[in-house]
Amino acid sequence: MSVEQTDRAFQRALREQLARNELTFAHAPIGQAIVELDGSWRQVNSALLQMLEYDEADLLAMTFQDITHPEDLDLDLGLLQQTLDGEITSYQMEKRYFTRTGRTVWALLSVALVRDEDDQPLYFISQILDITAHKKQVQALQDFTAMLAHDLRTPAAVIAGFAQLLSTGPYDDEVTSIARRIERASTTIVDLLENALTTESIDSGRLTARPTAVDVRDAVTTAVQAALSAAEMNEQQLEVDTSGLVPAVAWVDPVHLEQVMTNVIGNARKYGGSHVRVSTRVADRRVEILVEDDGPGVPVRFVPQLFERYSRSQEARTSKQRGSGLGLYIVRDLLTANDATIDYEESALGGAGFRVTLPAA
């Protein structure tokens, strides 16, 4: 084949490739665009025009900044600048656009920067997926969960209170036994509702830590008292050793810390043995709280899944202890929000050990 024939074949293949790319761009089922460095639209496809309800000429005369929701614009521009500066090569974010008729649509935006042979920026390639329906479904589920938890929490707490009065009153053994069963069940409902509310806050991004200086012993004492009360209600033998507590002040949200310690020490009561030990240590501007029990511990195969959502081991599912599998998932996210961590380790007592590490105040 001659050089001229080779060149013609190359040009033909190039034209065919360009035509395929153009067809792919034009008929893609999701919005696609080529965007100039200043944010103006160079080229848009029909899916994007349909999503934004604009004619092509009108949209090409605008910039993406013109139709971006003000609350999302700074984040978008910040990521775009990081891309131009070479700190990142692409980015993805959820953002809102205003359509021509004034509607707000949610989109999953993916952006990549194209550079020339000299590494100079040329333009952005954007893919824009309409996720409005998905966002509405998620919001509806979150609203339903919050409404259900709020509406059920008060009557469940009332039932638990009256059941406690009955269980400690001057009644015969049968009435006392039934009252304790009601109290246990209603307390479980309250715990599940609290977990549901916290999970909803995490999922919706509304979980915010308000750290302050907190005496760690206060949170531990509250959690220990709750565990001892639960053990008494369940006619369970439990001894909690707090002799290893040393003075420690952490920089943490007090409500979050109380919830974390109640959950971790409560787990030691439910799944451990009859002896629990809580100790603290201060080192390198961190406060460590170690909760240990003398129970069977966590199966080695299950340790990697401990902090996952809805995660319960086979042994826990077949035990008499009820749970949602949300406890340690919530604990981990609460601590993350407070620049803190939780880790599992084998206890010196022979069972499970959980080490909570907090910033020192």
Image (cartoon, rainbow, N blue to C red):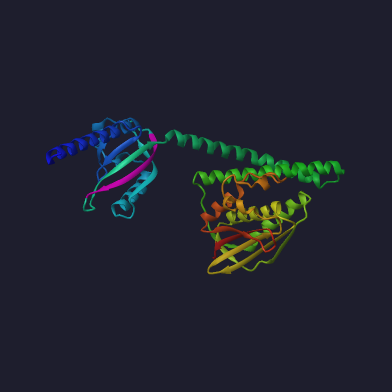
Query: Which residue is drawn at the image coordinates 64% and 38% (left, top)?
Result: 152
> Does 309 sit above or below residue 20?
below
Labels in figure, total: 0
The percent coordinates of residue 84 (x first, y second) are: 28, 52
Residue 113 is one of the magenta-drawn residues: yes
Residue 162 is one of the magenta-drawn residues: no
For the N terminus, the image quarter is top left
- Please identify the quarter of the rendering in which residue 190 is found: top right
The percent coordinates of residue 176 (x first, y second) are: 83, 44
Relative to residue 236, is residue 297 drawn left or right?
A: left
Query: Which residue is drawn at the image coordinates 56% and 48% (left, top)?
Result: 308
- Please identify the quarter of the rendering in which residue 70 is found: top left
SS assignment for the magenta stretch, majority? strand
For the residue pair 313 and 78, the one nearer the viewer reads as: 313
For the C terminus, the image quarter is bottom right
Looking at this view, name the residue that lies furthest to the right: 172
- Please identify the quarter of the rendering in which residue 344 is found: bottom right
For the residue pair 330 and 182, the one nearer the viewer reads as: 330
> Does 203 sit above or below residue 345?
above
The percent coordinates of residue 211 (x first, y second) are: 53, 58
Query: Which residue is drawn at the image coordinates 36% and 47% (left, top)?
Result: 91
For the residue pair 350 and 13, the one nearer the viewer reads as: 13
User: Which portion, as a residue range, is magenta?
Assistant: 104-116
Relative to residue 356, is residue 82 drawn left or right?
A: left
